[in-house]
Amino acid sequence: MKDDTELMKIVKEDILRIPGETEKGECTIEEIKKEVNVSSDYLSNTVLQLETGLFIIKSNGSLSLTEKGWTAAKEIVKKHQVIENYFKSIKKGNEAHKIVHLLEHHIYMEVIDNINASSSQFMGI
């Protein structure tokens, strides 16, 4: 079982990523529950920590990213997209998406930037 600190980091990143993938930086708690596989109590505690840390605003069952939340979410979404694009080139179907959900929490932005740069050079961009 994952260390609680590591699990909390993963859940926080997922909670920020989900609204970060939307145009307005908003989503419902239900949307998060569908994607984040933790107990309702754990999820509520993590949402409260993000709210206290001024990353999100919770209102009427919805979450909105703050400016601080947008900054964090952009980095998380970038990681997700770069890794997913890489794996889509070597894996089929939904397999790449599943792999990305595991890797995105354990990879440094420097690695993401290097993958992105290498992909751009390879593609002639």
Image (cartoon, helix red, strand yellow):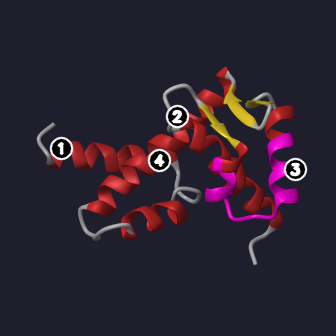
Give me the C-alpha separation between circle 3 and circle 1: 43 Å
Lower position in the chain sequence, tag 2 or tag 1: 2
Foreground of the two, 24 or 77: 24
Tag 4: residue type? Lys
In the picture of the structure, the residue carrying the numbered disc 2 is: 74
**Given this view, does label 3 or label 1 mark the residue nearer the observer?**
3
- Specify start and end residues of the magenta stretch as a single range: 31-48
Give me the C-alpha separation between circle 2 and circle 1: 23 Å
Q: Position of residue 36 (x, y in %)?
A: 66, 59
Q: Is residue 40 above or below residue 124?
A: below
In the picture of the structure, the residue carrying the numbered disc 3 is: 45
Tag 3: residue type? Asn
Lower position in the chain sequence, tag 2 or tag 4: 2
Determine whether the residue tagged by mark 4 lies in a helix, strand or loop.
helix
Q: Position of residue 20 (x, y in %)?
A: 55, 36
Residue 54 counted in the magenta span: no
In the picture of the structure, the residue carrying the numbered disc 1 is: 121
